[in-house]
């Protein structure tokens, strides 16, 4: 890859400035622990190999703030791609059932 990093979905350049991205990685590592959010593989102190993953896919919620970012190893990030996290899908289904459940 050459030049500015492009967002994997939108193709936008510099979706998060590289220096800012490095700072966000450190912030997220301090918040969640320096490990992959999905497979729990620990990252080294310098976070080599850690990528930022949009927890809710960017295509659904275009939010690149830390509250929607988790650390992921490259295999997990690639495997997840634009899929909805299982826990979020479960929450949405639960909320949906609660909305339409007959009153007890
Ligand atoms: Zn992983």
Image (spheres, rainbow, N blue to C red):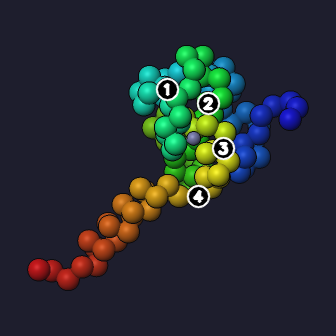
Label 4 vs label 1, nearer the camera: 1
Instruction: Indicate the secondary structure of the residue bearing disc 1.
Output: loop
Q: Upstream in the sequence, badge 2 or badge 3?
A: 2
Q: Position of residue 77 (x, y in %)?
A: 63, 44
Position of 97 with respect to 73 (left or right) is: left
In which quadrant is the N terminus drawn? top right
The mark that comes first in sequence, 4 or 3, is: 3
Residue at x-position 65% and y-position 52% = 79
- The answer to whether mark 4 and mark 3 are in CB contact below 8 A is no
Asked if disc 3 is less than 8 Å from ligand 1, the answer is: yes
Q: Are marks 2 and 3 in contact (CB under 8 Å)?
A: no
Q: Nearer the viewer, mark 2 or mark 3?
A: 3
> Which element is circle 3 on?
helix
Q: Residue at x 26, y 71 (%)?
A: 98
Q: Which mark is residue 50?
A: 2
Side of 60 relative to 87 (left or right): right
Residue placed under numbered mark 3 in the picture: 75
How far apart, in angstroms, are the residues tagged by discs 2 and 1?
Answer: 8 Å
User: Is disc 3 surrounded by few (<14), some (14 to 19) or many (20+) residues within 10 Å?
Assistant: few
Residue 5: x %, y % from top left: 77, 34
26 relative to 16, above or below: above
Which dot marks residue 88? Answer: none
In the rendered image, residue 70, in percent from the top left (x then y), is placed at: 51, 37
């Amino acid at each position: 890859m050459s030049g500015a990093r492009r967002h994997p979905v939108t193709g936008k350049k510099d979706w998060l400035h590289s220096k800012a991205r490095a700072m966000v990685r450190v912030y997220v590592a301090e918040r969640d622990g320096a490990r992959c959010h999905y497979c729990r593989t620990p990252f080294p102190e310098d976070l080599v190999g850690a990528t930022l993953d949009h927890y809710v896919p960017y295509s659904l919620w275009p939010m690149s703030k830390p509250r929607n970012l988790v650390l992921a190893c490259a295999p997990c990030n690639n495997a997840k791609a634009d899929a909805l996290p299982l826990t979020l899908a479960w929450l949405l289904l639960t909320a949906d059932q609660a909305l339409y459940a007959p009153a007890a």
